[in-house]
């Protein structure tokens, strides 16, 4: 392929040529450490890396073609020189998406995206061949990589889309082109990038904008007034929730500790904690029901899903029960986790709460609000970790530490027997490290 010089736009002939080369590869890779023999390698750039520097390594590990955007990286005839490797990856994914004939389910939201994606996958897999976003590859690189993994023999594809600023979901929707779209919720996440809660709502609702503009189907939780307001009078919708006039009615029963629901006389007990997971479970049930997955298979799909990767995991050590929810945190998910802990029947409860990031000017107020709720509802055993929490006003009984190293030395001396412990904080806090010291 020749060097593309104009606005990163491929001619149809050039894109077809690139696409045919892609179809002759086993997959696409952007990381030579994980590259498989027969892959197409894209030399992406970041603040601290330049994929063009690893082209020879890629070929040595079996890359069939390398897409590069620096002339110096062209080391043989199987290098494809373009103006921008990232934009080329995105355009290739968009071209591939246009050839996919089966439905794509796209989802976004402030909290619960990955859990919801995994639940939907678990339910649909009972009756169909399905592929979904791997892990949390949900950004401007992850979404194209996800789409390029979708083969011709699938029945459904599930694409998770994340964002921390406006127009990002609009862009990811233009690439993934979902046939069905859902938003898990609107919460206080990435306030700095979105410019406040209203910015979050506007940014996430770009998925609904795509759905409306292209006459696709929205999946709406009617228990969430914000979703109802954002979809407006659009008619092509599937509704679910606790109300009996929904397309799919699911009743919340309890969450002590695991969320249990009622669906069509079937009692379904998940392995997920917290009433905040009800909507995530309900939408997976609704999607399975819409596509005629047998009721017992839906039940099994929900009940078999086991949370992992520090997302609401329950870990039992002797007489101690640990709720490890340290993958990420924002004010909405933190408050939800605290409310869940409050309603549990356990007697001795302990909190290890880490800083929440990307809150901008709202950081102090949001952290103080969490402290106030924790101190009002839990008399003792409140441990706060991180500079934001450290700068909050607290009661004398609350223990706060500026860094993880500050609390690490005393963790071994804390009495944990017969306790239920919540560990919750943003990814950067890595609070799962607490498990190594207790």
Image (cartoon, rainbow, N blue to C red):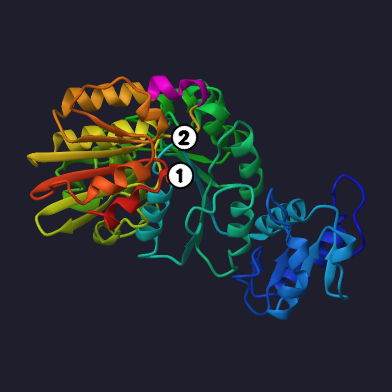
- Image height check: is 324 above or below 70? above
Compare residues 167 and 318 and report the one nearer the observer: 318
Q: Position of residue 400 (x, y in %)?
A: 29, 32
Does the stretch in magenta take in 190?
A: no
Closest to the observer, 220 or 303:
303
Q: Secondary structure at mark 2?
A: loop
Give the structural element (helix, strand or loop) at label 1: helix
Frontmost residue, 151 versus 274: 274
Look at 36% across and 29% down and name the residue there: 389
Residue 361 inside the magenta-drawn segment: yes
Can residue 395 be spotted in the picture?
yes
Q: Horizontal and vertical percent for residue 365?
A: 40, 19
Magenta stretch bounds: 360-366
Where is residue 34 drawn, in percent x and y?
59, 70
Q: Are marks 2 and 1 in contact (CB under 8 Å)?
A: yes
Q: Which mark is residue 382?
A: none
Which numbered disc flags the more N-terminal residue, 2 or 1? Answer: 2
Residue at 39%, 53% (x, y): give it.
120
Distance from Cα at disc 2 to Cα at disc 1: 8 Å
Q: Which residue is mark 1?
A: 428
State left or right for residue 218 relative to residue 7. Answer: left
Is 309 rendered above or below residue 65? above
Q: Which residue is mark 2?
A: 357
Q: Is residue 128 above or below residue 233?
A: below
* Left or right of residue 242, residue 288 in this image: right
Left or right, residue 91 beside residue 275: right
Q: Residue at x 65, y 56 (%)?
A: 97
Q: Is residue 372 left or right of residue 179?
A: left
Residue 215, image quadrant: top right
């Amino acid at each position: 392929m020749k060097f593309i010089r104009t606005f990163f736009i491929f001619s149809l002939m050039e894109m077809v040529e690139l696409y045919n080369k892609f179809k002759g590869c086993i997959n696409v890779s952007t990381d030579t450490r994980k590259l498989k023999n027969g892959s197409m390698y894209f030399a992406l750039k970041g603040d601290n890396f330049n994929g063009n520097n690893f082209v020879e390594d890629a070929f040595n590990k079996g890359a069939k073609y390398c897409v590069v955007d620096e002339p110096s990286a062209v080391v043989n005839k199987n290098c494809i020189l373009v103006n921008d490797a990232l934009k080329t990856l995105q355009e290739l994914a968009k071209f591939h998406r246009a050839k996919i004939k089966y439905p794509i389910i796209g989802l976004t939201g402030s909290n619960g995206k990955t859990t919801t994606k995994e639940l939907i996958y678990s339910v649909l897999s009972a009756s169909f061949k399905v592929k979904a976003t791997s892990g949390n590859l949900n950004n401007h690189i992850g979404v194209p990589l996800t789409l390029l993994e979708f083969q011709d023999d699938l029945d459904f594809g599930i694409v998770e889309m994340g964002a921390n600023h406006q127009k990002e979901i609009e862009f990811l929707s233009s690439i993934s082109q979902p046939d069905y779209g859902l938003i898990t919720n609107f919460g206080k996440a990435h306030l700095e990038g979105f410019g406040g809660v209203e910015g979050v709502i506007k940014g996430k609702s770009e998925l609904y904008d795509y759905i409306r503009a292209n006459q696709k189907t929205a999946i709406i939780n009617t228990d969430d007034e914000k979703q109802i307001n954002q979809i407006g009078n659009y008619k092509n919708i599937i509704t679910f929730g606790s109300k009996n006039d929904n397309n799919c009615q699911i009743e919340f029963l309890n969450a002590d500790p695991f969320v249990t629901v009622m669906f069509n006389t079937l009692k379904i007990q998940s392995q997920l904690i917290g009433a905040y997971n009800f909507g995530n479970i309900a939408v997976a049930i609704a999607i399975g029901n819409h596509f005629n997955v047998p009721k017992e298979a839906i039940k099994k799909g929900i009940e078999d899903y086991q949370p992992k990767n520090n997302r609401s995991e329950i870990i039992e050590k002797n007489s101690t029960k640990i709720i490890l929810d340290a993958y990420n945190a924002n004010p909405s998910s933190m408050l939800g986790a605290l409310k869940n802990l409050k309603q549990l029947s356990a007697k001795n409860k302990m909190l290890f709460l880490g800083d929440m990031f990307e809150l901008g000017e709202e950081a102090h107020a949001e952290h103080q609000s969490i402290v106030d709720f924790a101190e009002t509802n839990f008399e003792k055993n409140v441990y706060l970790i991180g500079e934001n929490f450290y700068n909050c006003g607290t009661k004398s009984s609350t223990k706060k530490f500026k860094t993880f190293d500050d609390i690490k030395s005393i963790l071994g001396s804390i009495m944990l027997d017969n306790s239920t412990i919540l560990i919750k904080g943003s990814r950067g806090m890595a609070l799962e490290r607490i498990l190594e010291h207790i």
